[in-house]
Image (spheres, helix red, strand yellow):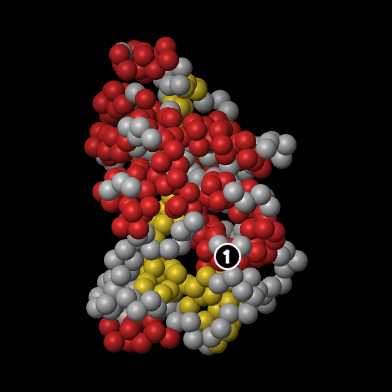
Amino acid sequence: MYIKRELSNILKKTSGYSPVIIVTGPRQAGKTTFLRHEDHGRRFVTLDDFEIRSLAKDDPKTFLERFNTPVLIDEFQYAMQLLPYIKIKIDEKRTKLLEIKENYWLTGSQNFSMMEGLQESLAGRVTILNLLGLSRKEIEGDFTFSGDFISLPASSFETKKNINDIFNIILNGDKPELWANPLIDREIYYRSYVQTYIERDVVSQLKIKDIGLFEKFLRLLASRVGQLINFASLSNELGISAPTIKAWLTVLERTFQVFVLPPYYKNIVKKKIKTQKVYFLDLGLACYFLKFNNAEALLSNYLAGSLFENWVVTELVKSYWYKGQSANLYFWRTKEGTEIDILYESAGKLYPVEIKLTASPKKGLFSSLEKHAALEKIVLGRKKIICTSQYNLPIDKETDIVSALAIG
C-alpha cells in the first residue's frame, strides 16, 4: 500500500524548472518509492547494483549515455564521479531540460562529501529536498490543512481524537513500511534498522570499533530528548572524549537521525545559554532504545512530557521541510532556567511557542520572555501553547491554545 507524501507538491513545482532534484533523508524513509510513484515512466537505475555502480564510477560518460534523461538515479552518493558529467549534460541542453522536463532525479543518504560535491559542481542547477518518515497528516491521510500547525487559527475546534492516538504514533515511529504493513514486528524492524544503519553509515564514516558503545550513546540520547546537550556528562558516562561525542552527534544529524535545535541569542538577553538541544527525528527509534512496548506505559512514564515535546518539534520540522522550506527554529533559555521551547522569526517578529503535556496550560508562561523582549525592543508575535486541549482557542488577547490533537 502506497502512502501519499506531502512532498509531492513541491516536487512537482521544482521539477518544472530544476535540472537536478535530489531527495535526501534517512534510510527507509521511502525516498525511492516516493520518486518512482511520482513518475512511473521515468528511467530508473540504482547504484546499489555493484556492476552498475562500477560503470558509473569508472566510465561516467558512458553511464549517462546509457541512462539518459529523464532518469532517477538511486543511491547517488556511491558515484560522485558523475557530477561533472551531469553538469556538462545540463549546460549543453539546458533549454531542452527545462522545456520537456528531461531532468535528473537523484536519491541519497546525506553525507558531507555528497552535499559538498553537489553544491560545488551543480551550483544553481540543483534543488535539494529532504524527506523524513511519515508525518501524522500522512499517516492519517488528511491533507485538508495545508499550513504548519502553529499557524492554526484560534477558532472554535473540537476533536474526538485523544492523547493515546499521539502516543501510539510516537511508539510506532514514522517509517512508511511499518504503517503500510501492520503485520511487521516493530521490535524486529528497529533492531534490524539499527544494525544496518550502524554497519552502512556510522562505522564507515566514524570507523567505530566498539559498536556496543555507540548504541549506548544512542540510548543515552533517547533518554535526554528535549534537554540541553551536556557533553561533559555524556563523556563521563561513556568513557570517551567530548570531541568524539560531538563528532558522533554530527554524523547522527547529517544522516537525519536527530535534529539539533540551536538557542536564540540575538541580543535578547545577556545571560543566555548557547548549548544546543537534541531531538530524535523518528521517535519509534527512540522508543526502541528506551524499551517501550505499549503506548499506555509510555504515557505514564516520566519521559512522556519530553517525548511529547519531541514529537511536536519533529512534526513542525516536517511541516517546513515538506513545503521545501528551512526549519529555522530556536529555543530560548536563560542561565536561571527560564525557557521557551520554540522561537521562530517571521516578518520582523519573533514568535514564541510553548509545548505542554496538559489539557489546561497555565497563563503567564511567556512573562519572562516578554520582559526581556521589551528591554531589547524586540517585537513578539502572537504566542502559542501547544497542548492536549480538545480545543483551539485564545487563552488571552495575545496567546492561543493550539490542540496537539489537531496536528495533522
> Residue 389: where, in percent of width, then height?
65, 74
Which residue is painted at 50% across and 37% down in the image? 194
Which image quadrant for residue 390? bottom right
- State whether residue 346 appears in this view: no
Q: Quadrant of the N terminus?
A: top right
Determine which residue is flagged by label 1.
302
Q: Quadrant of the C terminus?
A: bottom right
Helix, strand, or loop for circle 1? loop
Tally of numbered discs? 1
Which sits in the foreground, 194 or 142? 194
**Percent from the top left, x then y, of residue 332?**
37, 72
Q: Residue furthest right?
A: 160
Using residue 334 as the reference point, say whether residue 361 is left or right of it. Answer: right
Residue 242 visible to an observer of this rendering? yes
As displayed, is residue 354 above or below residue 145? below
Residue at 49% from the left image edge and 31% from the top image edge:
196
Give the percent coordinates (x, y) of residue 256: 43, 45
Q: Between residues 249 and 105, which one lies in front from this camera angle?
A: 249
Neighbour tally class for label 1: few under 14, some 14-19, many 20 plus, Cα within 10 Å: few
Residue 76 image position (x, y, % from top left): 39, 28
Q: Amino acid at mark 1?
A: Tyr
Question: Which image quadrant is residue 115 in?
Answer: top left
Q: Residue at x 62, y 43 (%)?
A: 4
In the image, residue 341 above or below residue 13: below
Residue at 72% across, 64% down: 161
Q: Which residue is nearer to you in this view: 178 or 138? A: 178
